[in-house]
Amino acid sequence: MMLLLLISCSEARMEHLWETARLWRAGENVVKVDAARDSLKRCPQAVSWLFSTKIYEKDRFGIRAIRDMFMGSYARTLPYLKKVLLSNSVEGVKNALYLIREWKVKELGDVLWQIIPRYDDRPNMLANIIYGIGLSGDSTLAKYIADFLEHEDELVRYRTVQALGRMRAYSYIPAIMMRLDDENAFVRYESCRVLYSMKDKSFPQLKKFARNAIGSGRFRYFIMQTLNGQCME
């Protein structure tokens, strides 16, 4: 029995299954793709194999296959995701960040903040790292990302506001308030949404600004939008 298990999960066997598992799951492919993915997942070393080989490839169908295979059951991939994040492979890190975003992984915030210096000159990757840190919900990590509220890239600013909101990082409410006057509309509306979600803490400060008519007309407008809950999804 053990011999059969080892033979069925040889590297050659997994490679054969992968050729079908990675296909676009649509139309007449659905049945055979699902069967291949199910068979591959039953191999004890499937996760180790996927995360030591396929995760580093530039293969959008392949990475989506990995996403779908472990959607809702990613726990067994966590040690391997961590290893990829700490690797020197830019493509591997990109793919790991994609999986973290898609799976909404909460457990890797303490790893993600450590790799920020490697990618602070790559706005798209930095934005995804910040998003991942926000998923942790750990407000003690807010200090590692708060400065990016002032970043030149609007996606980075947007993700930072979003992450601080998820972390309930109340001490950064004044800094988030300043983003109500951001030059980018998406950042302004996300700041409005986040501040409204923390209204017990943010409203006293917002009302003080409103009473004193502080800031630009745009800033005052978005303060009122926030207080009235008019920027919610």
Image (tube, rainbow, N blue to C red):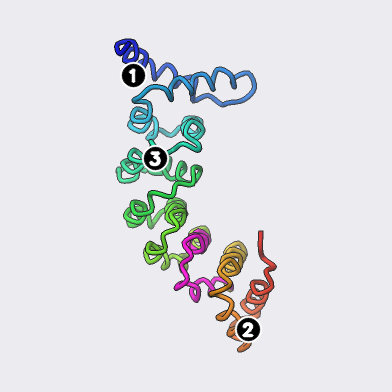
Quadrant where the N terminus sits is top left
Circles 2 and 1, Cβ within 8 Å, touching? The answer is no
Q: Quadrant of residue 140?
A: bottom left
* Residue at point 56%, 65% (across, down): 194
Callout 3 environment at 10 Å: few (<14), some (14 to 19), or many (20+)?
some
Q: Main secondary structure of the magenta part?
A: helix
Q: Position of residue 209 (x, y in %)?
A: 59, 84
Residue at point 50%, 73% (across, down): 173
Nearest to the observer: residue 183 or residue 115: 115
Q: Is residue 193 magenta?
A: no
* Residue carrying label 1: 11
Residue 215 vertical position relative to residue 99 in the rendered view, above or below: below
In magenta, the rendered stretch is 158-180
Q: Secondary structure at mark 2?
A: helix
Mark 2 sits on what residue? 210
Quadrant in which the C terminus is drawn: bottom right
Q: Residue 37: give x, y in percent of width and height.
A: 48, 23
Left or right of 36: which side holds 189?
right
Sequence-wise first label, 2 or 1: 1
Q: Which residue is mark 3?
A: 91
Is residue 159 located in the magenta-colored stretch of the structure? yes
The residues bearing labels 2 and 1 have C-alpha atoms spaced at a distance of 65 Å
Q: Nearer the viewer, mark 3 or mark 1?
A: 1
Circle 1 residues within 10 Å: few <14, some 14–19, many ≥20: some
- Along the line of sight, the residue nearer the viewer: 167 or 121: 167
**How far apart in space, not on screen, are marks 3 and 1 (Cα)?**
23 Å
Count the numbered circles shown.
3
